Image: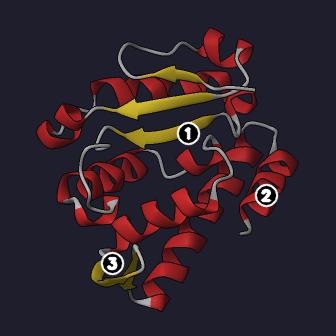
Amino acid sequence: MFPRIVKTGLVSAEMLRQEELFLFQVQKTEAESGDYVRIDQLIGELNKAKKHGRSKVGLAFGYDDDPRELIEIPEVCQYVTQIFSTCPHLLYFLLPDPDAIRTFVFCMIGARVTGRSGGTAHLEANEDAFNAKVKELADAVVSYGARIGDAHGARAHLAEIGI
C-alpha cells in the first residue's frame, strides 16, 4: 500500500478515515518561516478522526536537497519541538517508524552531530533527557488513547514502535 502524499494542501478527518496511510510533508519554507497553519490543521483533523488516525501519518520535511541530517537543521528541530509541544500525543498518529521518532526526539532534546563515518552521523545526546522525553511522549499517547476510548490501541502502537 502506497501512502497518499500531501506536499501542499490540507487533510480532512474524512480523508483520514478513508485512507490507510499519509505522508505529510512540511515544506522547507514552512519550517524556515515558522508557518504552522497546515500542520495545525492536520493535528486538528487527526484529533477529530481520533482512533481512525492512529498509526496513519508519516511526517517528512522538504529538505531532500540538503545533505544535512534533520537534527542538524535548526528550523526543523524548532518546528518539531513546537508541534510536539502543541500536541504531545502526536506520536499516536505517526507511523510506527522508530528511526523517524528517534530523530524527532533527538531534535526535541537538542542532540547534535559530532562527526560522521561511512555516511552515518554520530550524535551527542543526553541519555537521561532522551529517555525522559520518550517517557513523556509515551505517557501522552496512553493518556490520549484512554481519553478517546482506545487505550489498548495506544499501547499496541507504542509496542510497534518499541516503546
Q: Is residue 30 visible?
A: yes
Count numbered badges in the picture. 3
Amino acid type for the residue under numbered disc 3: Ala
Question: Is residue 129 placed above or below 88 in the rendered structure?
Answer: below
- Check disc 2: other Cα within 10 Å, few if <14, some if 14-19, many if 20+: some
From the viewer's perspective, is 79 left or right of 1?
left
Q: How is the image coloured?
A: secondary structure
Q: Residue at x 25, y 44 (%)?
A: 65
Q: CA distance from mark 2 to mark 1?
A: 15 Å
Q: Quadrant of the N terminus?
A: top right
Q: Residue at x 21, y 33 (%)?
A: 30
Q: Residue furthest front?
A: 118
Measuring from the top left, give residue 154's x and y in whole percent: 77, 50
Q: CA distance from mark 2 to mark 3?
A: 24 Å
Amino acid type for the residue under numbered disc 1: Gly
Residue 31: which quarter of the image? top left
The one nearer the camera, 156 or 23, is 23
Measuring from the top left, give residue 124's x and y in whole percent: 35, 87
* Residue labelled with disc 1: 58
* Residue labelled with disc 3: 111
The one nearer the camera, 1 or 84, is 1
Question: Is residue 114 placed above or below 77 in the rendered structure?
Answer: below
- Check disc 3: other Cα within 10 Å, few if <14, some if 14-19, many if 20+: many
* Residue labelled with disc 2: 160
Instruction: Confirm or deny contact between disc 2 and disc 3 (CB under 8 A).
Output: no
From the viewer's perspective, is 26 left or right of 97?
left
User: Which secondary structure, mark 1?
Assistant: strand
Q: Residue at x 64, y 63 (%)?
A: 138
